[in-house]
Amino acid sequence: MPYNFDDEMIDEIREKNDIVDVISEYVDLTRTGSNYKGICPFHNEKTPSFMVSPNKQIFHCFGCGEGGNVITFIMKHLNMDFVDTLNLLASRVNIDIETKKTKRNKELEDRNKLLFNINKDSAKYFYENLQNNKKALSYIRERGIDESVIKSYGLGYALPDWSGLLEYLLHKGYKIKDIHSLGLIIQRKDKSGYFDRFRDRIIFPIINNRGSVVGFGGRIIEKNGQPKYLNSSDSPIFNKGYNLYGINILKKYARGKDVILVEGYMDVISLYKYGIRSSVASLGTSLTENQVKLIKRYGKDVYLCYDSDEAGKKATNRALEILKKEDVEAKVIVLKDAKDPDEFINKFGLERFYETMSNALPYMDFKIQLYKERHDLNISEGRIDFIKEIVTELKKIKSPVERDVYLDKISKETKVSKDSIKEELKYLPIRNYKDKYINKNNRDNNKDRIKPVINRLEPGYTIAEKNLLYLICKDKNIYESVKTQISPEDFITEEYKKIAERLYEYYENEEFLFKTFEKVLNDNLIGTLENIYNTQINIDASQKNKVLEDFIKTVKIKKLENKKVALKERLKEIDLMDSKSEGDVEKFKSICLQLINIDKELKLHQ
């Protein structure tokens, strides 16, 4: 959910919490000159490389690259989110957040009410357009959608006009800046004006669990080179990762019933048309933990019914992991002879859909089927690779009985003995271990605990690159801002650089859609992209620019540092020469000047 902390309050919390005082509660610090030094808590080291500056109120580790202010330290060290961190630090210095929030909350409430009204009037405008447009209404009727479904979901139509909605909303007395903040209009590249985001599209209003219109999705009627679907960008009242299409219907009709999670608007509507009131769709993104929490509030068991193509299977696999993380044991409805639930139920009817649903695969059965499709079990190499993948899933099963059942099944499938598979399982390394200490006393009490092997922690700059790519994927407006400050060549991590190159190129040609973008990548980059897109970072709208600047700065600093190291090596090479030509001397001077300029740039960024 959006945070209710304004910049002034955040600054006050940060300023009143001296970074040395805070960090010394978790790390033993020793004064060295004007700074403090200690053993870095973010990676294993014997020689202290973790520095804290009381003057700048920042920390930086020269070993792993982690850095930031007092807020980011607590977030990273205690694995806390932004809001909880601010609450903790405010409490530490006796700042009464609730009192300070009162005025801010009233302003925010009034602002949000205005934005909700803009969306509500926009939905009415789209609805009236549909009722009065023969082409759009004919398309809807051909899809088997009657008036009752149109009303239930508030379906509408965006005219082909470039500024129809904009003029309508201006006439209603709304301001351009507020309309633009909702992503309903887009500023022209030459900044000469604005135009409607949605044009000549069937409109699907996205309504939250409180019955308010928070955003829109639009589907083209005729192929015209535009993306098939277009969604509202995130706004002060809309975050895709916190909402689900159809959640208002699920809340109204299907509380406590089985929930069917699908991918598209038309999947939800077609199931509703046949009497299934308990389906919802994620909004053009991979399923998020917050969406799962929303489902758990209203539903019982969860069924995944995604597209039957390769991209749909990958999306199902990702969604299963998120659901499992939230302790939801979902089942997978496997569709045959149809590409998606919309086509399936219209082609075969409700009875066949329920029959298919009754044969849905549990988590482990789906994984076995998925990995069997990836590997040829008729050859030794295929069986070995299959077992290496599937044992990672077996490791997650807590029940000894359940694990033994699947060991039997896998043994029969692969013709490999259970004992051999158990041995493979036994030596599977433990991964993703995080040592969470709440305070220094707890750290001391846990000295003698045996710790699993800790995988290498990501350096700060790779985390920054990953988060930048994630945010660019989430919002084209962020891409427009970021591309002016950082290019694909500025990315240091080779895989991230390649993805950035394709992503920048992709955005210049069409709207970003994860499923279609994934198809333009090489196979070896798809896993990296999935990892990026499953990143979960929640940023208050008011803090977005600051956070982006921090990520960009981190990447730029690392690139400059790398360049500085390379230039110093070149200086050594020239310095070690027995005899130097005039050209070598000039190169030496040139490199020295470059190093001076790099130091100036680094100071500007620090």
Image (spheres, rainbow, N blue to C red):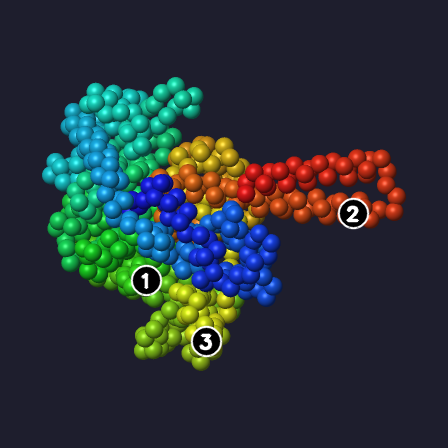
Across and down, in percent, residue 250 comes to: 17, 50
- Identify the disc placed on residue 438: none
Quarter holding residue 141? top left
The residue where tag 1 is placed is: 324
> Residue shown at 39%/44% (left/top)?
11
The residue where tag 2 is placed is: 573
**Which label lies toward us, 1 or 3?**
3
Answer whether residue 517 is visible to the viewer in this image: no
**Which label lies toward us, 1 or 2?**
2
Across and down, in percent, residue 157 comes to: 22, 30
Q: Amino acid at mark 3?
A: Arg
Q: Tell me the SS state at disc 1.
A: helix
User: In this rendering, would 570 be left or right of 155?
Assistant: right
Q: Are marks 2 and 3 in contact (CB under 8 Å)?
A: no
Q: Decide which of 124, 480 is in the foreground and name it.
A: 480
Q: CA distance from mark 1 to mark 2?
A: 55 Å
Q: Amino acid at mark 2?
A: Glu
Q: CA distance from mark 1 to mark 3?
A: 28 Å
Identify the image quadrant of the C terminus: top right
Label 2 or label 3, whichever comes before in sequence order: 3
Q: Tell me the SS state at disc 2.
A: helix
- Near mark 1 (Cα within 10 A), the count class, few <14, some 14-19 or many ≥20, is some
The residue where tag 3 is placed is: 449
